[in-house]
Image (cartoon, rainbow, N blue to C red):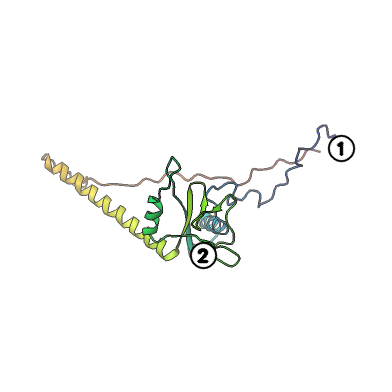
Amino acid sequence: MKVPLIVTEPPPEFGELKTSPEFFTASGMDRDVTYVPGFSELRYARDAAILEVMRGKRRPQDVPTLPVNFRWARCQNKKGDPDNRKVIRHGNRGYRLVTKDLVGEGKLLPEIPAGARWGADGTLMQGDTVLMVADAAQVARNEFEKRARTASATRGAEAGFAAALEAVGGKPAAGAAPFITKDVGQRTRAELSPKTKAKET
């Protein structure tokens, strides 16, 4: 014979928590201080697709790409005074300031993030940062140039090691010339939702 559970405590102040897939999503603005409506969901969907590729559930060519990239650029110094050095740096890389004409239904940004505000100059601010955006083609070019600079610096460092060794009269043994490698650590698995225990009866 089953004995019904006897409730001995009042319900929580705001009611019982009812979990759902949406509750555990990592793309929510309460978990991401850089959250941008619409764009953050696209990034999360891409990350989820890459995870499916790693698990063998999706083809790599089916992973979606992003149409633009948003970036919050710091526009003040530690004292709170205007400092646009990072805004200028991003501008030199093809980013432009997000203004009111880019926000609204059917536009680049459906709405402004919670807590953001419009600055006196018409830019979208959040704290000491301002929102900037760049098209996918420009961001891809930036990434290519960044990788090219890294590869060039790596080759330069390897050549420098060899030159320094020769300067002191040394020579690397066959197959033991100075080189740089990159070690990738083990993958870490993160669970989006905890396993729930079955209710006792």
Using the rendered image of the protein, determine whether residue 56 is visible from the camera's viewpoint: no
Q: Which of the image's four quarters has the N terminus?
A: top right
Image location (x, y in percent) of residue 68: 48, 62
Q: Is residue 77 above or below residue 88?
A: above
At 23% from the left edge and 45% from the top edge, which residue is drawn? 178
Which disc is residue 4 wearing? 1
Q: Disc 1 or 2, which lies upstream in sequence?
A: 1
Image location (x, y in percent) of residue 43: 52, 57
Q: Residues within 10 Å of mark 1 (few under 14, many from 20)?
A: few
Looking at the image, the residue that sits furthest to the right is 1
> SS of the residue at dot 1?
loop
At 56% from the left edge and 66% from the top edge, which residue is drawn? 107
Q: In this rendered view, identify the residue nearer to me: 72 or 195.
A: 72
Image location (x, y in percent) of residue 165: 16, 42
Looking at the image, the residue that sits furthest to the left is 169
Mark 1 near mark 2, Cβ–Cβ under 8 Å? no
Q: Is residue 99 left or right of residue 2?
A: left
> In which quarter of the view is residue 170 placed?
top left
Q: In this rendered view, identify the residue nearer to me: 36 or 187.
A: 36
Q: Amino acid at mark 2?
A: Asp
The residue pinned by badge 2 equals 62
Looking at the image, the residue that sits furthest to the top is 8
Q: Which of the image's four quarters has the C terminus?
A: top right
Using the rendered image of the protein, determine whether residue 186 is visible from the camera's viewpoint: yes
> SS of the residue at dot 2?
helix
Q: Amino acid at mark 1?
A: Pro
